[in-house]
Amino acid sequence: MLNKYARAFFTRVLTPFAALLLRLGVSPDAVTLIGTAGVMAGALVFFPMGEFFWGTIVITIFVFSDLVDGNMARQAGISSRWGAFLDSTLDRVADGAIFGGLALWYAGNGDDNVMCAVAIFCLASGQVVSYTKARGESIGLPVAVNGLVERAERLVISLVAAGLSGLHKFGVPGIQILLPIALWIVAVGSLVTLVQRVVTVRRESAEADAAEAAAADRGSGAAQ
Ligand SMILES: CCCCCCCC/C=C\CCCCCCCC(=O)OC[C@H](COP(=O)(O)O[C@@H]1[C@H](O)[C@H](OP(=O)(O)O)[C@@H](O)[C@H](O)[C@H]1O)OC(=O)CCCCCCC/C=C\CCCCCCCC
Ligand SMILES: Nc1ccn([C@@H]2O[C@H](COP(=O)(O)O)[C@@H](O)[C@H]2O)c(=O)n1
Ligand SMILES: [Mg+2]
Ligand SMILES: [Mg+2]
């Protein structure tokens, strides 16, 4: 949903910045790489220490690189298969760092085995949700469904909650409850999305196989 409705807004807002980077001689690949490194640093340095506010600030600054890199490539007319591969692959790395950082907090001083397991589930299910689309498309199917909770939703729900939970350290009472609530929402939402995508791939593959069998039948009928 965010991908559909918010992308146009962010494209308008980020286009001048993307143009500036191109004028400065920065490449889209460099933005992809630096953005991922920044997200990883924010997530793996701050989250395991329970510094959710500062971690979220650092991650938020760098995560928008994922919208800037493609914008730069399109403006410069240099969108490429390599760029698409690099972008999607490093998305998985960044997501692994964010949910891994949260899991490390709960496994350590956060001391909550259930929430550690929920964070690991968010990490794994998010990766599988993305894989269903990539694999479905690689076997020639349209995978014409995005589902309830795409990557943008996973990130926005988790990061808004993490940032707000971090305000606990600044004296806001009770607010840290938002992070576990958000992780449960992302976990359940990712599971629903996974089922939506698997059901779609199952239907599309059955339709494609039936169409192929019908075409083969017509071919052998014509040969007789
Ligand atoms: C005192 C308050 C403290 C709070 C501190 C600040 C809080 C800020 C919190 C959050 C900000 C989060 C911003 C997250 C922005 C995410 C941007 C992003 O990365 O979007 C990527 C997404 C997809 O891009 P791609 O096409 O490159 O990716 C494809 C996709 O990932 C597929 O994944 P799948 O769904 O299949 O799993 C992959 O299959 C594919 O491989 C991959 O290539 O881009 C978009 O979706 C575009 C829309 C972005 C919408 C961003 C909305 C941000 C909205 C609000 C943030 C501000 C909230 C402020 C809250 C303040 C709280 C007090
Ligand atoms: N280094 C890059 C990054 C991205 N691309 C192209 O942009 C598409 C992704 O667009 P986003 O707005 O989601 O970033 C991607 O599929 C590539 O076509 C690129 O060429 N090089
Ligand atoms: Mg991108
Ligand atoms: Mg991306």
Image (cartoon, grey):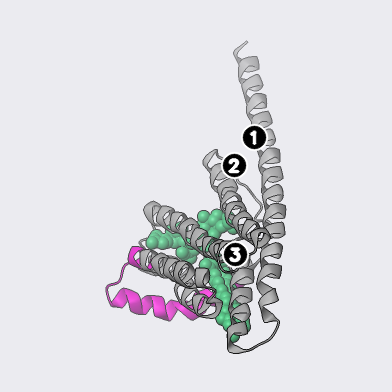
Q: Amino acid at mark 3?
A: Tyr
Which residues are drawn in magenta?
6-31
Q: Earlier in the sequence, mark 2 or mark 3?
A: 3
Q: Gap in Å between the C-alphas at discs 3 and 1?
A: 45 Å
165 relative to 131, above or below: below
Q: Gap in Å between the C-alphas at discs 2 and 3?
A: 39 Å
Q: Amino acid at mark 2?
A: Leu
Q: Position of residue 156 (x, y in %)?
A: 60, 71
Mark 1 crowdedness (10 Å alpha carbons): few <14, some 14-19, many ≥20: some
Say what secondary structure mark 2 lies in. loop
Say what secondary structure mark 3 lies in. helix
Q: Residue at x 58, y 67 (%)?
A: 155
Q: Is the residue indicated by label 2 positioned so its CB lies within 8 Å of ligand 1?
A: no
The residue beneath circle 1 is 208
The residue beneath circle 3 is 106
Q: Amino acid at mark 1?
A: Ala
Point out the image quarter for the C terminus. Answer: top right
Q: Nearer the viewer, residue 90 or 71?
A: 90
Q: Position of residue 87 (x, y in %)?
A: 44, 59
Q: Residue at x 66, y 65 (%)?
A: 183
The residue beneath circle 2 is 141
User: In the rendered structure, does residue 48 fall within the stretch colored magenta?
Assistant: no
